[in-house]
Amino acid sequence: MPDREKLNIVPFVSVDSMMRLVLHFGVERVLADLAGYIEEDFRRWESFEKTSRLASHSPDGVIELMPTCDGRQYSFKYVNGYPKNTRNGLQTVAAFGVLSDVDCGYPLMLSEMTILTALRTGATSALAGRYLAPAGAKTMAIIGNGAQSEFQALGFKALTGIDTVRLYDIDPVATEKCLRNLAGMGLTLVACRSAEEAVEGAEIITTVTADKNCNTILTDNLVGQGVHINAVGGDCPGKTELHRDILLKSDIFVEYPEQTRIEGEIQQLPKDYPVKELWRVIAGLEPGRSNRRQITLFDSVGFAIEDFSALRFVYDRLQETRMFEELDLLADRDEPRDLFGMLLRKEAAMRQG
């Protein structure tokens, strides 16, 4: 139960506060620590309420709500996905989230989640890579060099030890941006002129494009034995990145099958096509990568438990950093059954002032 003396004040983590918090600890440490929270929550997967996200689709994008609860704390995230926004100088993804106390239903924290979602996506991908990528992998290709690419690169560096990143985007400006942002981060960076060039020698292939279409970013002939594919960009109905033949020759790992079959790469396959759940691998109930010739595919669409983990991580960091603003979000706790009286008391105070 939260401190009753502070119940009417809710910590608010603004964009500025989130940036200061991340820079205080360092991006790679945040990615690694956040992956630890996600791993911990995946190990207790069965204790969570689970539902596919609630999505409202439009021709240009989607607005979604992602709720979950472990019986002690509840969280939800509001997030959108509008690929066309970049043409108007807007973010492709914008998000915020709430972590609440189940005992009284009061919010514990309100936070921006645009930056936090990028961090948790990179952390989740890298966590999956630690279980599924070939041992000793050093080179990763990233196809799609937009807002998520740097988080993917640094997440895999922190968790799997990659040291080389091969970059490709149909927009060379995006690749130049990524090269500039990752300079001096301890990675060997290679700008490539095609997807074919990018995957040469790569043991891990990340696809993270934004277009809301069924595209073929990666074809079957580009994927050799022993590769781990981290498919991040396909995350809603009618949006995929991989040729169907790649799926048929891969061992596929997903977050929540009911959601991934609607939104992920496996929307191209029959509804009963066998896939493995990542949480079961992390919990030690099923094997991940079993041999070096195996092609593993993490069909990542993002799931509410990962957002729960991210909000829990930030909330814990607030206790030591105090990097938040106080938000007067809740009504007067002294007279919980007298909301109208609260208005009258405010009116009297305004008259006196």
Image (cartoon, rainbow, N blue to C red):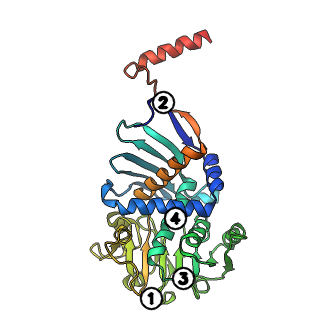
Q: Measured from the top left, where is residue 151 in percent x and y?
A: 59, 65
Secondary structure under tag 1 reads loop
The residue where tag 3 is placed is 137
Q: Amino acid at mark 4?
A: Ala
Residue 141 sits above or below residue 212 on the image: below
Q: Measured from the top left, where is residue 222 in percent x and y?
A: 51, 87
The residue where tag 1 is placed is 292
The residue where tag 4 is placed is 123
Circle 3 Cα neighbour tier, 10 Å, few/some/many (<14 / 14–19 / ≥20): some
Secondary structure under tag 2 reads loop
Circle 1 Cα neighbour tier, 10 Å, few/some/many (<14 / 14–19 / ≥20): few
Q: Residue at x 59, y 42 (%)?
A: 324
Q: Amino acid at mark 1?
A: Arg
Distance from Cα at disc 2 to Cα at disc 1: 55 Å
Q: Residue at x 63, y 77 (%)?
A: 167
Secondary structure under tag 3 reads loop
* Residue 85 location, quadrant: bottom right
Closer to the chain start, of discs 4 and 2, is 2
Closer to the chain start, of discs 2 and 1, is 2
Left or right: residue 153 compared with residue 257: right
Residue 20 sits above or below residue 41 on the image: above
Q: Do residues under tags 2 and 1 come within 8 Å of each other at their CB atoms? A: no
Q: Measured from the top left, where is residue 342 in percent x and y?
A: 46, 18
Closer to the chain start, of discs 4 and 1, is 4
